[in-house]
Image: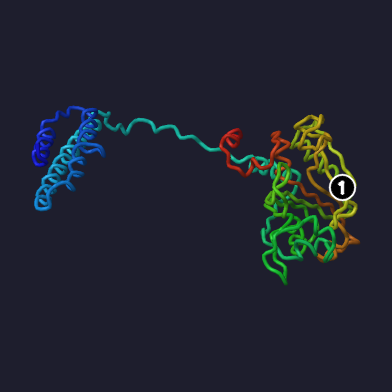
């Protein structure tokens, strides 16, 4: 049988092939159109045809291929339309498919709770930019130039001379409020801050802080302690223990670290509390007289206290989360727990 007779034979097979369902359609494709099918095999034979007959042979094979593809496409559309036809008609009166609602991020939940607690204590909320200058972030808060305390808050600088940087704490808002308003002042601010720190289970280069202060006549350390006692008990429960440890901050004097009993290990020791049973949640103290002077407030007439806490640390303790990185990994398995 010569090549032309083979083309005629395959054409006859194509035209007589019975296609009554999708399975037979797939068999048709595999037998004639697939890479190892009969029609591609005929096209491969063109190199063995005499040069004076190649044109006619190529035209015959091409017509055969177009015929097979036309039959395949026609049957394919027929079966697809049949599937659509047997589907139930659209009923616009049916209720919509249930839509899975999202949930608030745990940091947002805790942030809203903090706002609620401090507003009930008479604090109002103030806001400030995340990009600050050197005065509002350091100098106004009694950080002398080249002072070692600035190394504790190494940050990301945007410009130099004058220094423009990403704020290292929300205390920069405190300076803006004190320079624009007159005492008595009782306010707090929450927002993102930035520090050049290695990312670990307990630290991140981007995190959130809440900072607050109260300025009036005759404000004492007792007022500071009672404010923070009330906050801790409202946030973590009345059984939570709190302690103050002497510390140093350039913008407060005297200063104290704020520790609470570890809610994750219940005082037994874990990686979050460094196996001490206590976790630091922030710093506090009486506002330094130099800060009042820098802001144009009479430090002989007014006194005040200030405090600052990490939002992530509070959230970790409240929900017993052991790794800070979970807050920024966007793992839905973690986030869905806070519906």
Q: Which residue appears at 84% of the width and 35% of the height?
A: 276
Q: Which residue appears at 62% of the width and 44% of the height?
A: 328
Front residue of 235 and 331: 331
Quarter holding the N terminus is top left
Front residue of 66 and 122: 66
Q: Which residue appears at 68% of the width and 56% of the height?
A: 127
Where is residue 239 shown, x and y percent of the image?
Answer: 80, 30
Where is residue 270 shown, x and y percent of the image?
Answer: 78, 33
Where is residue 209 shown, x and y percent of the image?
Answer: 72, 49
The crowding category of the residue bearing disc 1, from other C-alpha atoms within 10 Å (few below 14, some 14 to 19, many at least 20), is many
Determine the secondary structure under disc 1: strand
Outermost residue on the bottom side: it is 161
Identify whether 287 is placed above or below 160.
above
- Left or right of 114 in this view: 84: left
Quarter of image, res 243: top right
Quarter of image, res 132: bottom right
Identify whether 339 is placed above or below 214.
above
Residue placed under numbered mark 1 in the picture: 256
Q: How many marks?
A: 1
- Left or right of 154 in this view: 51: left
């Amino acid at each position: 049988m010569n090549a032309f007779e083979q083309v005629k034979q395959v054409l006859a097979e194509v035209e007589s092939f019975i296609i009554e369902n999708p399975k037979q359609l797939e068999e048709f494709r595999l037998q004639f159109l697939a890479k190892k099918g009969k029609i591609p095999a005929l096209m491969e034979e063109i190199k063995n045809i005499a040069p004076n007959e190649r044109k006619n042979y190529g035209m015959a094979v091409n017509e055969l291929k177009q015929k097979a593809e036309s039959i395949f496409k026609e049957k394919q559309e027929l079966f697809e339309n049949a599937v659509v036809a047997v589907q139930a008609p659209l009923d616009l009166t049916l209720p919509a498919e249930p839509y899975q609602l999202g949930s608030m991020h745990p940091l947002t939940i805790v942030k809203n709770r903090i706002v609620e607690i401090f507003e009930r204590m008479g604090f109002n909320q103030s806001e400030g930019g995340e990009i600050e200058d050197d005065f509002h972030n350091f100098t106004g808060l009694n950080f002398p130039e080249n002072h070692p305390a600035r190394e504790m808050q190494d940050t990301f600088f945007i410009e130099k001379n004058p220094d423009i940087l990403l704020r290292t704490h929300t205390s920069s808002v405190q300076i803006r409020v004190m320079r624009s308003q007159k005492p008595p002042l009782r306010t707090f601010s929450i927002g993102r801050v930035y520090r050049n720190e290695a990312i670990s289970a307990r630290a991140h280069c981007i995190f959130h802080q809440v900072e607050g202060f109260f300025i009036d006549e005759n404000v004492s350390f007792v007022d500071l302690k009672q404010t923070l006692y009330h906050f801790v008990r409202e946030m973590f429960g009345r059984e939570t223990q709190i302690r103050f440890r002497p510390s140093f901050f350039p913008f407060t004097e005297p200063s104290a670290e704020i520790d609470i009993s570890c809610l994750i290990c219940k005082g037994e020791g874990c990686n979050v509390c460094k196996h001490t049973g206590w976790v630091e949640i922030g710093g506090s103290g009486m506002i330094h007289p130099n800060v009042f002077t820098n802001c144009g407030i009479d430090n002989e007439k007014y006194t005040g206290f200030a405090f600052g806490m990490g939002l992530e640390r509070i959230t970790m303790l409240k929900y017993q989360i052991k790794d800070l990185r979970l807050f920024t990994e966007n793992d839905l398995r973690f986030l869905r727990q806070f519906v």
